[in-house]
Image (cartoon, helix red, strand yellow):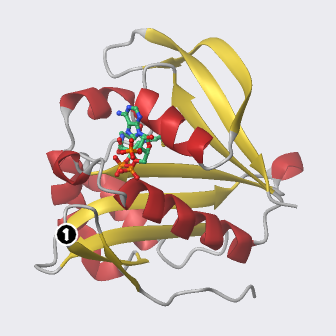
Amino acid sequence: MIERIEAPIAATLRNGRVVTIRPLAESDRDELLAFGRSLPNDDWLYLEDDLQNPEIITRLVNAHAAENWRQIVAVTESGEIVGYSAVRRLPGWSSHVGDIQLMVRADYRRCGLGTAMAQAIFEAARDLGVAKVIVEVMQEQTGGIAIFERLGFCVEGTFSDHARDRFGARHHLHILAYHVT
Ligand SMILES: CC(C)(COP(=O)(O)OP(=O)(O)OC[C@H]1O[C@@H](n2cnc3c(N)ncnc32)[C@H](O)[C@@H]1OP(=O)(O)O)[C@@H](O)C(=O)NCCC(=O)NCCS
């Protein structure tokens, strides 16, 4: 059994607001659904998991202690979830690779929360024991590309027309990667 790093981190953001970054818990279901429902339409269009779907939220929350998965949330002092990130070990011959997802509520963006969560999920990826981490982003997710490039990730590949959005339109998918070891 791999050790988990579970200590909550208090972060003061550039807008002066304080959030706690901690592992997702089973009791977070309602708040995580409220977070998903608060995401702007543009995000909703491009995100891999539909966080507005209660069944998906239940699946995520039920997996809070899964061996090959680490999920973290950023929580305000009043208990609202304003950020979610996850790293999941890929199966089979890529089992040394972790796949990262990251999203921040629109009114908490450009205050350093994405960076703080990206660093926390990166630590979680080390805890998971992966040698490489990747982020899959549609070409239009410029904020996501910018934040991970700033953290040292590079585009390792682009798949043409590889991802479909909620309306069925196809988009190029970039794979950004960082080699941990
Ligand atoms: C990507 C995302 C997580 C960034 O969160 P954030 O809290 O705004 O990130 P930060 O405040 O830490 O921003 C760090 C840096 O990333 C870059 N960045 C962030 N958003 C950007 C944007 N929309 N356009 C250009 N650069 C951006 C900037 O360099 C920024 O630094 P600065 O504010 O000092 O200029 C957020 O925009 C989001 O949830 N997007 C939708 C989901 C998504 O695309 N996720 C990524 C792929 S899984």
Q: Quadrant of the C terminus?
A: bottom right
**Ligand 1 sits in quadrant:** top left
Q: Name the residue at 33% across, 22% down.
A: 166
Please say if 68 is above or below 105.
below
**Disc 1 residue type (three-letter):** Gly
The residue identified by callout 1 is 16
Q: Which quadrant of the figure has residue 40?
A: top left
Q: Name the residue at 40% across, 54% down.
A: 114
Q: Name the residue at 21% across, 43% down.
A: 39
Q: Name the residue at 43% across, 28% down.
A: 141
Q: Quadrant of the N terminus?
A: bottom right
Q: Determine the secondary structure under disc 1.
A: loop
* Disc 1 Cβ-to-ligand 1 distance below 8 Å: no
User: In the rendering, at what x and y percent does residue 47 appear?
Assistant: 40, 36
User: In the rendering, at what x and y percent does residue 13 appear?
Assistant: 29, 66
Left or right placement of residue 167 versus residue 154 in this view? left
Q: Nearer the viewer, residue 42 or 1?
A: 42
Q: Nearer the viewer, residue 112 or 72?
A: 112
